[in-house]
Image (spheres, grey):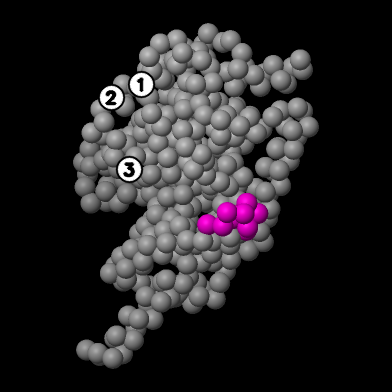
């Protein structure tokens, strides 16, 4: 057996490891404890939706952008970089998921285990670290620091200034518990995701490309793609089976319909590469260059934020081809377009409508 395979098996938990067994067993105990309160099921499912990395692109980015365009770009950039890092980390760290480990390991045969899966349980990638916690934590950090700074301008109270950070930590904790509840992650994976997410948010906030040439975004998009592909094929060449998690998810998912293509590792990479490219195209579009000299009113920004979240959600859910290659192509076009919709198209439309109303009803 090669050293690479030994390390792989140890990380995956397919060989005996008292430490990992203890972590996994305690995680199953906590999941059972959470599922014993069925009245909170809808709450946990709603919270796990709020932590979905897709929400960074279709909800948090447009909301933050129309509060402050710089904050919005920071949220989007932190989200896509942290998602790319999460993908690579999962390839290197492996990590079981509770919904399959409890069955594959034979743990459930040692005694009565009362657990049930949900449609959101059956993710196909490795489990460590939690992407929901890591990506949401990194992406929301710029928004939280901006809200804290705004609060400090209107109040000298340290408690008021700390409120955004307290809500931020509570949200991450709730997202982590929701992931344990639906059997998507173990507690140590959640904790790791939260810690790394906060650290990344702090590191990336000051490094967002707010005023860069189009070539920078093209190079960034290409770097995300090539670096991931290089890592993937290097691990394959070393004998690491990167499809192991997909096999286990398919084997132990309670309903085959719950196995979704958008949970596969390359689905997130596709989203990140497209968004990095789309952000550059949007910031250098003629619509955006025209709007830079026009300041939207507060009501116009509210309308833009509401319309943007609605339009992006509809576009995200629309057109889901069953053919894998076609799905990746359509999804790439969607996410490459989303930044332009938020940054250029909707502000231009809202501003045009408002201008026509002023011209039609001059004061």
Residue highlighted by disc 3: 46
Dominant secondary structure, magenta? helix
**Residue 169 picture location, percent across and down:** 34, 35
Nearer to us of marks 1 and 3 is: 1
Residue highlighted by disc 2: 36
- Left or right, 164 with respect to 96, comes to left
- Residues in magenta? 320-329
Labelled pair 1, 2 in contact (Cβ < 8 Å):
yes
Instruction: Determine whether the residue tagged by mark 3 lies in a helix, strand or loop.
Output: helix
- Left or right, 319 with respect to 170, comes to right
Residue highlighted by disc 1: 114
Nearer to us of marks 1 and 2 is: 1
Tell me: residue 16, above or below residue 70: above
Specify few, some or many for label 3: CA neighbours under 10 Å numbering under 14, 14-19, or 20 or more: few
Kindly identify the residue that appears in the image at 21 percent across and 47 percent down: 155
- Left or right, 194 with respect to 274, comes to left
């Amino acid at each position: 057996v090669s050293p690479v395979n030994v390390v792989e098996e140890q990380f995956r938990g397919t060989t005996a490891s008292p430490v990992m067994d203890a972590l996994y067993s305690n995680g199953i105990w906590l999941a059972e404890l959470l599922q014993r309160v069925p009245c909170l099921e809808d709450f946990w499912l709603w919270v796990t939706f709020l932590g979905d990395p897709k929400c960074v692109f279709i909800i948090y980015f447009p909301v933050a952008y129309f509060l402050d365009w710089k904050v919005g770009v920071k949220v989007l950039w932190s989200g896509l970089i942290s998602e790319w890092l999460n993908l690579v980390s999962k390839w290197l760290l492996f990590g079981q998921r509770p919904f399959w480990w409890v069955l594959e390991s034979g743990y459930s045969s040692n005694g009565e285990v009362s657990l049930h899966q949900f449609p959101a349980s059956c993710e196909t990638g490795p489990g460590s670290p939690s992407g929901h916690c890591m990506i949401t934590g990194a992406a929301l950090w710029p928004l939280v620091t901006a809200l804290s700074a705004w609060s400090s301008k209107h109040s000298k109270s340290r408690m008021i200034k700390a409120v955004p950070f307290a809500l931020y930590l509570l949200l991450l904790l709730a997202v982590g518990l929701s992931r344990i509840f639906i059997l998507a992650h173990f507690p140590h994976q959640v904790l790791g995701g939260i810690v790394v997410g906060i650290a990344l948010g702090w590191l990336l906030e000051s490094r967002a490309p707010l005023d860069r040439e189009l070539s920078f975004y093209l190079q960034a998009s290409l770097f995300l793609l090539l670096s991931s592909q290089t890592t993937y094929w290097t691990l394959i060449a070393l004998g690491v089976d990167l499809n192991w998690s997909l096999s286990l998810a398919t084997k132990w998912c309670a309903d085959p319909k719950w196995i979704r293509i958008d949970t596969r590792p390359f689905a997130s990479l596709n989203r990140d590469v497209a968004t990095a490219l789309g952000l550059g195209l949007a910031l250098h579009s003629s619509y955006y260059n025209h709007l830079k000299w026009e300041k939207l009113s507060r009501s116009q920004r509210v309308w833009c934020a509401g319309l943007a979240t609605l339009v992006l959600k509809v576009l995200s859910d629309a057109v889901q081809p069953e053919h894998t290659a076609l799905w990746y192509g359509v999804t790439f076009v969607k996410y490459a377009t989303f930044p332009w919709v938020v940054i250029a198209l909707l502000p231009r439309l809202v501003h045009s409508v408002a201008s026509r109303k002023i011209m039609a009803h001059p004061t």
